[in-house]
Amino acid sequence: MFFAHSNDTGDESGWQPLAEHLHTVGQSAGQFADVFGAGSLGEVSGLLHDLGKYTDKFQQRLRGGDRVDHATRGALIAHEKYGLPGLLLAYGIAGHHAGLANGRERGDRPSLHDRMTSDLPELDGAWRQEIHLPDQPLPSPQGFRLDKTRLGFQQTFLARMLFSCLVDADYLDTEAYYRRFDPHPKPARGSPVTLVQLRAQLDTHLATLPDQGEVNRLRGEILQAVRAKAAHAPGLFSLTVPTGGGKTLASLAFALDHAIAHGLRRVIYVIPFTSIVEQTAGVFRRAFGDLGDVAVLEHHSAFSDDPGKEPEA
């Protein structure tokens, strides 16, 4: 039996089987990557990310032995089996703990090339019975259009997206395993609030806003015009409205309508100035009422979830 994770109970029968971890991470990473048409690539990265744990050295590590590189072997096999697409996966597989490495140039840590040409522990053949990889070649992401003038950027961006899917999937499954032994586990991740609930709360809030006067009448017209476009196919939309025209709530209403209409999962606001981020997050929380603190995730360099604590410089 090969294990992915151990615990402090002293009973190895409760350790997480390695095959279970790899298949779960592969499934989750594939689901995450399927959002941008790269489900097969995500699944393979998950299946291979901890392949180096099929070694005697790593299994001894779980019993108190020395640290051992368990990530590079999967990266090497990805490259050997799938060629260039596999090399793209290899960056994320090798770096799912340490971060993405340079390709060849040596910086403050070994490059991917250095790691894949290093002396690695020998894999036990059991992995071939427990892990079944898709046949080659791996399909390109659905809808991916190669642009030779931006090839480097496209490959880099895709590699980082896949890396993100893998890291999230690995972290979540590892966390779920250790939650079994935590006497005081934290609440499960994810929001219990749906976009439909948020839209209903927003509509309730919008109904309380004043509608008398010329400015409020124009705000209402802008809101109606914006929401009328929500059923259009996903793409790039722009809204040009003077200050005071109600863009913040109108854009939120459009975003929720559009996301619900097309089965999207969340709304992300990206704003250039911290002060405007804080202001916008506050408007959203008030608009969502009791759901605001759960539904709005504010993230920037000055944010602190402790109101009495100043952010670090």
Image (cartoon, rainbow, N blue to C red):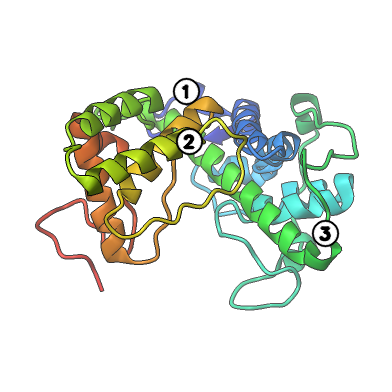
Which label sits in the foreground, 3 or 1?
Answer: 3
Name the residue nearer the viewer: 216 or 29: 216
Q: Which amino acid type is marked by label 2?
A: Leu
Q: Earlier in the sequence, mark 3 or mark 1?
A: 1
Does dot 1 land on a helix, a strand or a loop? helix
Name above or below for residue 34 compared with residue 271.
above
Q: Percent position (x, y) of residue 142?
A: 77, 38
Q: Element under label 3?
A: loop
Front disc: 3 or 2 = 3
User: Marks 3 and 2, Cα distance to the nearest angstrom?
Assistant: 34 Å
Q: Counting other residues with Cα less than 10 Å from the Cα at mark 1, is it few (<14), some (14-19), or many (20 or more)?
A: some
1 or 2: mark nearer the eye: 2
Q: Which residue is mark 1?
A: 14
The quarter in which the N terminus is drawn is: top right
Regarding residue 55, the answer to whether it shows in the image is no
Residue 276 point in image, percent of width and height = 29, 61
How far, Cα to Cα, is label 1 from label 2? 18 Å
Query: According to the image, label 2 marks what residue?
Result: 172
Q: Residues within 10 Å of mark 3 (few under 14, many from 20)?
A: few
- Dot 1 amino acid type: Gly
Quadrant of residue 155 within the rendered picture:
bottom right
**At 44% from the left edge and 40% from the top edge, which residue is drawn?**
226
Q: Nearer the viewer, residue 191 or 48?
A: 191
143 sits to left or right of 98: right
Which one is earlier in the sequence, the residue at label 1 or at label 2? 1
Q: Which residue is mark 3?
A: 147
